[in-house]
Image (tube, grey):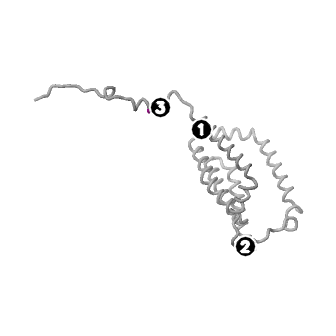
């Protein structure tokens, strides 16, 4: 066994273990932390596949931003674990059906005779000066430019909608009015009281 295969199987084992822990832990904070471990293992596998850009994006975007946000939300919310466990039994048949469908799909794709070097040969070796980030960017901003701009507009609409939903005024919240603060006069805030001096 080569060193590359050993590292691949190591990352794959860590990924399977972390994914199993994500769906079996009772504490949602532990599940989120195991999901971070799964992301790191996936990034390692992508590095072996010479997809450095995807690995870095996975670490920076998902681990550095999305998972931190999920973790803060989970830790800030007062989650009733007993209620979650009670609802788990009700959705067990649907979860088992989805797991069966996914297992069948995986078997049809990776099953015997469908996946191998004879069916899908290994890609040709790239020179040392090859940069997959540059290749991905050149295709993304030329061939798929319209789709990229549409995705950017959809994300912008989602950001505006999220800000609009969270910026509603609540009656119990105190607000400042800068225009009234600027127009304030000394007589409105200061009162001079004359008192006799004491000996």
- Residue nearest the observer in this picture, 68 or 194: 194
Q: Is residue 7 above or below residue 58?
A: below
State the image coordinates of residue 84 (x, y, percent, origin top left): 67, 40
**Which quarter of the picture shows residue 192?**
top left
State the image coordinates of residue 64 (x, y, percent, origin top left): 60, 54
Disc on the earlier residue, 1 or 3: 1
Q: Secondary structure at mark 3?
A: loop
Q: Is residue 70 magenta?
A: no
Q: Which image quarter is the C terminus in?
A: top left
Q: Which residue is mark 3?
A: 175
CA gap between label 1 and label 3 equals 18 Å
Comparing labels 2 and 1, the label whose residue is closer to the camera: 2
Disc on the earlier residue, 3 or 2: 2
Residue at (62%, 38%) from the top-left corner? 162
Q: Is residue 12 above or below residue 82?
A: below
Residue at (71%, 66%) from the top-left corner? 48
State the image coordinates of residue 140 (x, y, percent, origin top left): 72, 56
Q: Which residue is mark 1?
A: 163
Q: Secondary structure at mark 2?
A: loop
**Which quarter of the picture shows residue 34?**
bottom right
Residue at (85%, 57%) from the top-left corner? 109
Q: Which residues are magenta?
A: 174-178
Do tag 1 and tag 3 residues touch (Cβ < 8 Å)? no
CA gap between label 3 and label 2 equals 61 Å
Q: Which residue is mark 2?
A: 127
Q: Secondary structure at mark 1?
A: helix
């Amino acid at each position: 066994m080569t060193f590359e295969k050993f590292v691949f199987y190591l990352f794959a084992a860590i990924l399977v273990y972390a994914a199993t822990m994500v769906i079996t832990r009772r504490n949602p904070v532990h599940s989120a932390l195991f999901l971070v471990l799964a992301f790191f293992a996936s990034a390692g596998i992508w590095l072996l596949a010479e997809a450095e850009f995807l690995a870095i994006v996975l670490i920076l975007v998902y681990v550095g931003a999305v998972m931190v946000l999920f973790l803060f939300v989970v830790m800030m919310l007062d989650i009733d674990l007993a209620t979650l466990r009670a609802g788990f039994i009700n959705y067990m048949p649907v979860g088992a059906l989805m797991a069966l469908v996914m297992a069948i799909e995986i078997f049809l794709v990776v099953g015997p005779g469908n996946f191998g070097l004879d069916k899908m040969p290994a890609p040709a070796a790239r020179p040392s000066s090859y940069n997959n980030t540059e290749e991905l960017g050149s295709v993304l901003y030329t061939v798929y430019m319209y789709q990229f701009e549409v995705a950017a507009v959809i994300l912008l609409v989602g950001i505006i909608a999220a800000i609009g939903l969270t910026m509603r005024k609540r009656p119990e919240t105190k607000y400042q009015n800068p225009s009234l603060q600027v127009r304030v006069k000394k007589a409105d805030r200061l009162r001079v009281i004359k008192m006799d001096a004491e000996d």
